[in-house]
Structure formats: structure tokens, C-alpha cells
Amino acid sequence: MSTDQPANAERDYLSSFTAHTRVVAAGRPARESDAGVNPSIDLNSTFIAPGSVGYGRYGNQTWSALESAIESLEGGKTLVFASGMAAISAVLSILPKGAVIVASRNGYTGTMTLLKRAQESGHAEVRYVDIANTQEVLAEIKGAMLLWIESPTNPALEVADLPTIIAAAKSINVGVAVDNTFATPLVQTPLAMGADVVIHSLTKYISGHSDVILGSISTNDDALLNRLNDARKMAGAIPGPFEVWIALRGLRTLALRMDRAQSNALELAIRLSSHPAVEKVRYPGLATDPHHAMAKSFMKGFGAVVSFDVKGGAQAADLACESSELVAFATSLGGVESLWERRHRWSAESPTIPTNLIRLSVGIEDVDDLWRDIDAALTKSQTFQK
């Protein structure tokens, strides 16, 4: 939205709809005679003065459309960034030197790398915790400036008690940032629980087609929004309008994609649990998963990522990933297609993650087709041991 008045009008109009409707309806142009139903792609770098935009690094009508759509889902004013890493970096960049950060010991490798560098350079003190151990988190946030949460974690799929730890952190003036990429706002809305910022890699579920690199930050704190907006402007971490338009188009099917992908993920997790080539399955949707009860208590779903450990170690896991024909051997997640990889093929992966763990991002294909491919690949992964 180009001004506060239209943005407020859209927010009021959408407030009565469910999130499944808002993914379709939000971020549309005003309904005027002969107007398009979709926003245009704004390719301007320069704008006539005076005005609210000023310059192409400060704003863009296509950005505003996607930002307002995400705002309607997350419940907070939103900024889009050139990548998820740009969004994460913007949050960390506004912390003062010496800030104490509490973060999960398991998490996205890009975030883990930034935190490690901040600690090694003396810019921050990082306290790593088991984010699913509520008492450990509550003990470590004392004296901290920021609690950084991924839940479910990448790739261990641990689930944090978000309502409890967010409330506890805010009661002692600790800032809270939640990476909501795995869950999406269809599954959980951390700002409604009291979090200060919510981060997304829009590359994943929100765009949903493995064709753009984008990120976002949402917040209800206007002063914090201004600081993050300044960080975006000055670092130049701005998205291209075409990519933003593609992401907004992808958002329209988020509810359909998530419904199908989550259904597939649960069925595959059940089947993997009894596969002779699998040692352990991690998926909070399983009733046997240690995080199931917690996830069920406040989440509206369990996500579409399944992680599992393959018998035979790293070599067997690699062979499985290399042997699939339908599931693509590739990094990333959240697209319509299923992807898998052994996470420890990346040197930056957390040492607490098993070397034989495969992260499977479940897509929207027919579940029986997926299972035939996965079963054949896992069966082949065991042949080198004979």
C-alpha cells in the first residue's frame, strides 16, 4: 500500500476472513473500473518529488503489495528483503556490541554462522540452548538482550514452547525474534504471542516454487520497524520488484500447498517409521514424537518437513539421496516439489545433528508416487553393506 489510509482500509476489510482467504485476497489493488486484479510490477528506481517513496531503495509499490499481504497473515507491519539472510542480518545488525543472544543449538546454518562470527569477533555473547527445554531457556534468558527462536528447528524439528518462553522473555524486557519459515503463519503466529519480530525466508513456503530468493521481517513495534527499515536502506538489502511479484503470486496458493504437503508429510513419516533402512524419524505430527504434545497444544499443523536417520551412516544416507528419481537431491525446502539431502554434507551444519540425518521437504506430489521413490532409494542405500 502506498499510504497508511489504504493499508488501514485493507487491514480492516481482511480482518474478518480466515488466513486461507487472506492469502488470496491480501495485497490486491483497489477495485476501480478497469483496474487489474493483480498489482503491477513497479520497475522504477526514480520517483517524482514530493512523495512518500523518494527513491527506489526506499520503497516500491510492488514491495508494498507483498508486505501488506504478509502483514495480514503475521499481524505486523512488514518489510521485504533481498533474501532470508538479509532479513536475519538486519535484525542482528541493530544489536549493540556486547549484546547477549540466546539461541537454539540447532538451527538454520546461515543463522548459526552469523551467530558464530558475532561471538568470535566479540560483537556478541551467544548462549546456545536446547530450545525445546523450556526450563533451560528460562534460565539462560536472564540478562540477555535477544532470544532468537526457530521452531520447529532446522533440521531437528524440535518444538519450542513459544507461548511460555515468549511471555517469560518479554516479562524481563528481553527482545524476541522468531524465524517462522518452517511453520508459516498458517500454522503459528508468534507476534500474537508477544514476539517482537518474525522472520521469513520467503524463498521457501510463501513463494513456494523454488524460483526466487527473498526474505521478510514483520513487527508491531513502529520504532523497531523504522530501525529495521533504515538497516535495509543503508545495507542496500532490497528485493527486485519482479521477484517480489513472483512471490506474491506464489503466496496465493500457500494454503492449498501447505494442506497437501502437510498431509503428505504425515503419511510419509508414518511409513518411514517402519522402514527397515530408517533408524529414527523426526516429525512433530507423529503421536510418538517427543514434541507432538507441545506442537499440538498451540500449532495449527505440523509443517511439511520430515527428518530421519538412515541406517548405515553418512555413506548410506548419501546413496539414498543420490538414488531417488522423483525426489530431487537438492538443498532448500518449501517448494511444490519434494527435495531431500543429508544435511551434514554442509560443513556448517550443527555438530549436534547426526551425520546420517536426511532432511526431506515434502511437496505436493501424489504420496504413493513419493513413497515408491523413497522406498526404492532407501532400499538401495543398504546394498553397499552386504
Image (spheres, grey):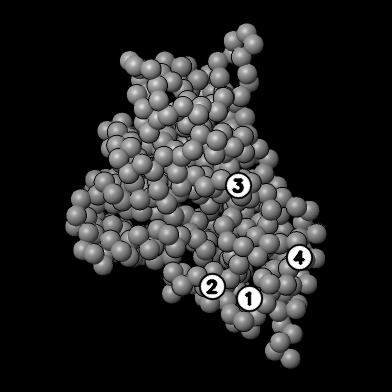
Disc 1 target residue:
318
In the rendering, which numbered label is found on residue 211? 3
Residue 102: x and y, percent? Answer: 31, 59
| Type of amino acid under label 2 | Arg
Disc 4 target residue:
325
Quick check: 371 above or below 17? Answer: below
Measure how far apart labels 1 and 4 are at the Cα level.
14 Å
Residue closer to the observer: 72 or 34: 34
In the rendering, which numbered label is found on residue 153? none
2 or 1: tag closer to the N-terminus: 1
In terms of image quadrants, where is residue 307? bottom right
Residue at 19%, 57% in the rendered image:
98
Residue at 51%, 65% in the rendered image:
156
Residue closer to the observer: 344 or 379: 344
Residue at 65%, 37% in the rendered image:
253
User: Looking at the image, can residue 183 be seen?
Assistant: no
